[in-house]
Amino acid sequence: MKRILSLLLLVIVIGCKQEPKKELTAQDIVNKSIEDSGGKLFETHEVTFDFRDLKYRSENIDGNRVYTRTRDLDSVVVKDIMTMDNFERYMNDSLVKVKDSMAQLYTNSINSVHYFVRLPLGLNDAAVNKELLGKETIKNKEYYKIKVTFDQQGGGVDFEDTYVYWFNTESFKPDYLAYSFHVNGGGQRFRKAYNERYIGGIRFVDYENYKPKQEGSDILEIGQLFHTDGLELLSKIETKNITVTDESE
């Protein structure tokens, strides 16, 4: 009897033994964040919003993602339309010719605005390389710190830029991001997300936009510069009048 009880106890102990906790990868963290932020809803829903007096639209047409930017200039309505491999400009519904160099500038600008609005969705693009740098505490909260770089092929004209994202270890939301850039003399920016809201199941945020008070800092240390008030506020980046429409309806 004692032997049977001992065996039963052993079975219970083994059964109650927990599996070793799996270490999360950068990909795991990004996937969880994208899922929480709306995931594939970005691909099946039309999104419109205003940013700096310009109107933007993201929609799916014949299986292709199409970005539109519209602005009113007195009596002229200028509409820019870009896809993955094409750019067109219309003035009062008439197609106008745009030099390749200017078309590239307009495309980069439109894509950049949509990229930040759709975050963290873009972090699973094919040209993105993700590296988990460990955990970091900012303003008494713990974050997964992920470095992002880009392949030249498919990484756009700014493929040499380096980004850093801080994902809350409990919610997996990207509360902060930073990036180094090389155009116009180069520099660094740090963004703090605020004014979180969900519209049509998709997460949207605004940002406080900072830069280092002193030049020459390491982009990987910029989180601690924010933590120790080593950054200065440049601007606020606000997305207004957001609408989300299910394209299947």
Image (cartoon, rainbow, N blue to C red):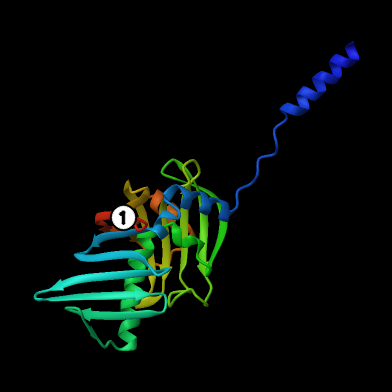
How many marks overall? 1
Type of the residue with mark 1: Thr
- Taking the spot 32% from the left edge, 72% from the top edge, the residue there is 109
Q: Nearer the viewer, residue 51 or 139?
A: 51
Report which residue position mark 1 lands on. 245
Q: Residue at x 27, y 57 (%)?
A: 239
Q: Measured from the top left, where is residue 39 in percent x and y?
A: 45, 53
Farthest-out residue, front: 249
- Quadrant in the picture for residue 180: bottom left
Q: Position of residue 16 (x, y in %)?
A: 72, 27
Q: Residue at x 31, y 55 (%)?
A: 245
Q: Secondary structure at mark 1?
A: strand
Residue 174 visible, this orientation = no
Where is residue 97 drawn, in percent x and y? 26, 88
The answer to whether residue 140 of the structure is visible from this angle is yes
Horizontally, residue 1 falls left or right of residue 231, namely: right
